[in-house]
Image (cartoon, rainbow, N blue to C red):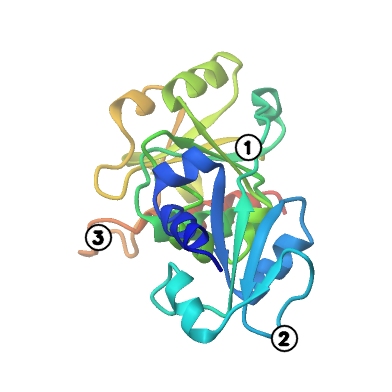
Amino acid sequence: MTKAEIQLIRSLGDKRGRSETGLFVAEGEKLISEIRSSQLRIRKIFALEGLFTGPDVEIVSTKEMERLSLLKTPSKALAIVEIPHHRLDVGAFDKHLVLALDEVQNPGNLGTIIRLADWFGITDILCSHDSADCFNPKVVQATMGAILRVRVHYVDLPALLHEARQASIPIYGTFLEGENLYHTPLTPHGILVMGNEGRGISTEVGKQVTHKLLIPPYPADCRTSESLNVAMATGIICAEFRRRQG
């Protein structure tokens, strides 16, 4: 383990470092095993003795792993992985359900949403450029391996949604003035937009939404929390979309 390797790993904790190198860090024996079985390319693995073998593996001590790890609780293995580049096919949005995230900035929320997408069979997520980076170490850990199966695209979200709307693709979004989720017709395809943790869906993105939805509180006439966590709301809405499909 060289000083240059330590500096590289440290730089990958920052978005700029990941962008400049095209690399990200994955930690944990299970996640690294999944990456090894995927199409992603691993540059190098640092691991405690007995976990991995191969020419790309370097055995390190527990103390060295503590120096390398980007997590609060160091793992037993860490890998440097090449960031994948996915092709975006807007034409397929009229056949599948797609998630769109408008300025979702909390890494934990983004990681959980990617994991939810994987659970509900959603293979593409559109993120505005100011959303959290999906290869942030905290996001990667929160996805629990889902980042290997869900394609995350960073796009000019208002422009892409406008293109989709022009193609008559339904665009759903969550609003306080929206229609009751459970009483609204839902299609098995289209784009589901989820907004920022504090501000919700931006005005520019909101202009492209064709169907406004509301997750109703229960009971309706009682005082409840002002809002739901964006990841929790995503799970509720995705579950309802899939339930309608039978």
Q: Say which label, 1 or 3, has the lower sequence index.
A: 1
Q: Position of residue 30 (x, y in %)?
A: 67, 74
Near-viewer residue (27 or 119): 27
Q: Say which label, 2 or 3, has the lower sequence index.
A: 2
Q: Where does the N terminus fall, quadrant-wise?
A: bottom right
Q: Where is residue 159 in the image (x, y as percent from the top left)?
A: 46, 19
Left or right for 159, reference 35:
left
Q: Nearer the viewer, mark 1 or mark 3?
A: 1
Q: Name the residue under label 2.
A: 50
Q: For numbered disc 1, what is the local secondary structure?
A: loop
Q: How many marks?
A: 3
Amino acid type of the residue that numbered disc 1 sits on in the rendered structure: Thr
Q: Where is residue 214 in the image (x, y as percent from the top left)?
A: 38, 46
- CA–CA distance in space, label 2 to label 3: 59 Å
Contact, mark 2 vs mark 3 (Cβ under 8 Å): no
Mark linked to residue 187: 1
Q: Residue at x 69, y 23 (%)?
A: 91
